[in-house]
Image (cartoon, coloured by chain):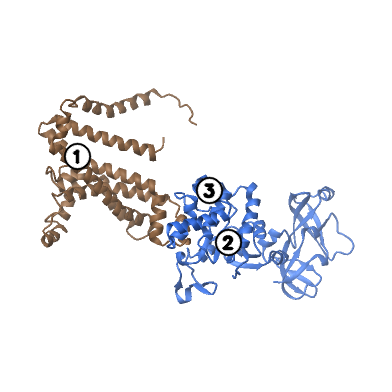
Amino acid sequence: MQVHAGRVAALLGPNGAGKTTVLRALAGLLPLAEGQVVLDGHMLEDTGRRLRVSAERRPVGMVFQDYLLFPHLSVLENVAFGLRARGARRRPARAAAAAWLERLGLASLESARPGTLSGGQQQRVALARALATDPRMLLLDEPLSALDACIRAEVRRDLRRHLKEFAGVNLVVTHDPLEAIALADRLIVLEGGRVVQSGTPAEVSEHPRSRYVADLVGVNLLRGVASGGAVELEGGGRLEAVGAGTGDVFAVIAPSSVSLWRSRPVGSPRNVWTGRAAGLDLLGDRVRVRVEGRPTLVAEVTPGAVSELQLAEGAEVWVSVKATEVRVYPA
Amino acid sequence: MRLPQPFNPVLVALAGLCALFFVLPLVGLVARMPWTSALGILANRDVQAALRLSVVCSLASTALACVLGVPLAWVLARLRFPGKSLLRGFTTLPMVLPPVVGGVALLLAFGRRGLIGEPIATATGFGLPFTTWGVIMAEAFVAMPFLVITVEAGLRSMDVRFEDAARTLGAGRWTVFRRVTIPLIGPSLAAGAVLAWSRALGEFGATITFAGNFPGTTQTAPLAIYIDLESGQLPSAVMLSLLMIVVSLAVLVALRGRYLGD
């Protein structure tokens, strides 16, 4: 995993993928079983050489999921804590903390206790506290998940601005793809403790490489072996695709390009098979129908089409996909 | 909001009986209070010495309990090692042990003929028993468990991620302990210290066994009360008893207001 300074990377993944574990390991709160952590060319941890810089010596700032502001200290003392812990005298530490609070628009809250603040204010105090020690790397663990939905957009905008101003390495952990795309220039998708995909949000959403990403983007992802303009799918079925290439591939089909019929369609579609409607979800003014067959796909149709096709759970339907609508890329 | 409870006459009658059981002895004490000679009793040097010793020794043993008991509570709450439950059993044993037994045990360990006491006595000529230090030790022995279990519970219920947050801010282990852990368990620490202190203040059995009963050096208020009663000086015993009650009540009220809610 590699993250560049001055840019914001988001570590995205389902619950239990190990996102928070990665952050804690980077911060030095969890020892690595095996591997290295290098920051700006400085080795922070190397299990091979039994080298390990302890958490308090790492130039790392962390914003925790529920912020963990010290309840017994005032806002100003919270922000000054890091400087005091690193040996600064009380007066300069407080002055520096006050400057950070000013910068984040919190000057009026200096003497408040964290418990009296709103979620958004707590988040900014946590950010000020992490930034006050002048870290080279900023780690944010689900920075917006503790907030009410109604203020999340506004806080996200503010947070994005502050992250842009930070010159060091920025890593945000989130399970919310919207948040990841809004905050980050680069996505790193983590599943089952492994990086399955990384790149710009556009790259990741155009070429999903896992079920999780495909679900986020809302497309059908299939895997198989391509040869001679067609893909033999894992789990049965065969798709003709324009430009299928050869070898191990992913095939992506947008639900809107999947057509459903009551009887075998006539005409041009190259890929035609029968399936059974297994689930119907209303999504805005569209209906998403899961059709089990070889292969199983999700199709997006209008409510009118649903009644016309007499679609219900268990109904038999014909499925067709044009060869030009199947996008194939190497696995 | 509290919903009205159905009235149960049997429970209320038993509760009233229970309340009388606690109140009547106090009424008896107050009824025999020697109001006219109160000042004369308070002027007595032995009475003053007993009160002073009680206050000094209970505070000193509480301080000892904090300095040694908090680290023990931390070890019990945070570390994993074999024999931990055994260690916890030993440290809480004095809570259920008859204090006299504790006094005997202390004597056999730290007395002039004791396991550790003898080498110390031959090397330095100093013996703990029958000194004010002995009183402090006996009181700490009996009172420390209250502090240890209260603080351990506080440490267990504390969110340790606050300590993680402090570490990412550059705080070393002592800074974390001093500026984050201790303040966060402040209420437990205060409650434990007050419990230990009140236990030490009332300590009798271990003290008289290990430290003896010498006016001015080891005779604390509870010992003085007992001796006064035995030697027929009832007014003095009643006077000291009432003073102890006032102090205990003050502690209870302070605790209830701050830590027990309601």
Q: Distance of mark 2 from mark 3, alpha carbons? A: 37 Å
Quadrant location of the N terminus of chain A in the rendered image: bottom right
Res. B187 in view: yes
Q: Distance of mark 2 from mark 1, alpha carbons? A: 64 Å
Image position, residue A133 (x, y; %): 50, 62
Say what amino acid the circle numbered 3 marks: Leu
Q: Distance of mark 3 from mark 1, alpha carbons? A: 49 Å
Q: Are marks 2 and 1 on the same chain?
A: no
Q: Judging from the image, what is the letter of the chain drawn in brown?
A: B
Q: Nearer the viewer, mark 2 or mark 3?
A: 3
Q: How many marks?
A: 3
Say what amino acid the circle numbered 1 marks: Leu
Quadrant location of the C terminus of chain A in the rendered image: bottom right
Residue on which disc 2 sits: A17
Q: Judging from the image, what is the letter of the chain drawn in blue?
A: A
Q: Are marks 3 and 1 on the same chain?
A: no
Q: Nearer the viewer, mark 2 or mark 1?
A: 1
